[in-house]
Image (cartoon, rainbow, N blue to C red):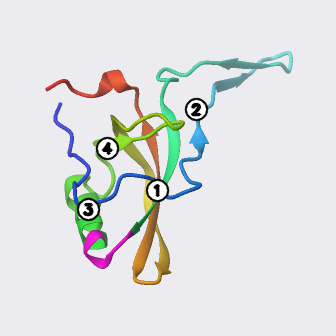
Amino acid sequence: MIYPEWPLSLPHAQMEGDGSGLMFRDPIETEMEGGDLRRRRRPGDDVMRLRFSFRFTAEQANTWASFVRDDLYYGTARFLMPVAIDGMPCDTRVMQMIGAPNFDGRSGSLRMYSFEAWVFPADMVPVE
């Protein structure tokens, strides 16, 4: 499968203090007749949920908007992006946005954007 790639003109390093998230998905919970709660793994538990924040120039913001709208079909498609996880070197991962990306206002001449995404395991990245 061919995934759109994060535009080279955009930074991929998260802003300082971001990159927070969940190590894996919440378990499936089922209430039992006796009142107990049964919890079990979900398929795809090795998927992480991370939050990303970026400061873009006006030109980068236009590239970002075009990428999300056109290449990701309004944020619904999976894509490839270099990601640093837990201080490890950047590794390209398959990603998928959760919900719509946020516009957080301006910081001087820069515009701030953020989004949450599922980060899939490295073995899901297509081999060229």
Residue on which disc 3 sits? 69
Q: Residue furthest left?
A: 128
Q: Of the two numbered discs 1 and 2 on the same chain, state the one appearing first in sequence.
A: 2
Amino acid residing under circle 4 = Met
Judging depth in this view, the residue of 34 and 72 nearest the camera is 72
Instruction: Label 1: state its secondary structure.
Output: strand
Residue on which disc 1 sits? 115
Q: Nearer the viewer, mark 3 or mark 2?
A: 2
Q: Which residues are magenta?
A: 56-60
Q: Nearer the viewer, mark 4 or mark 1?
A: 4
Q: Of the two numbered discs 4 and 1 on the same chain, state the one appearing first in sequence.
A: 4
The Cα–Cα distance between marks 3 and 2, rounded to whole angstroms, is 28 Å
Judging depth in this view, the residue of 42 and 14 nearest the camera is 14
Q: Which quadrant is home to the C terminus?
A: top left
How would you rate the neighbour count of disc 1 (Cα within 10 Å): few for under 14, some for 14-19, many for 20 or more? some
Q: Of the two numbered discs 4 and 3 on the same chain, state the one appearing first in sequence.
A: 3
The circle drawn on residue 46 is none
The Cα–Cα distance between marks 1 and 3, rounded to whole angstroms, is 14 Å
In the image, 103: left or right of 42? left
The Cα–Cα distance between marks 4 and 2, rounded to whole angstroms, is 18 Å
Residue on which disc 4 sits? 81
Q: Of the two numbered discs 4 and 2 on the same chain, state the one appearing first in sequence.
A: 2
How would you rate the neighbour count of disc 3 (Cα within 10 Å): few for under 14, some for 14-19, many for 20 or more? few
- Mark 3–mark 2 CB contact (< 8 Å): no
Amino acid residing under circle 2 = Met
**Residue 53, placed above or below residue 79:** below
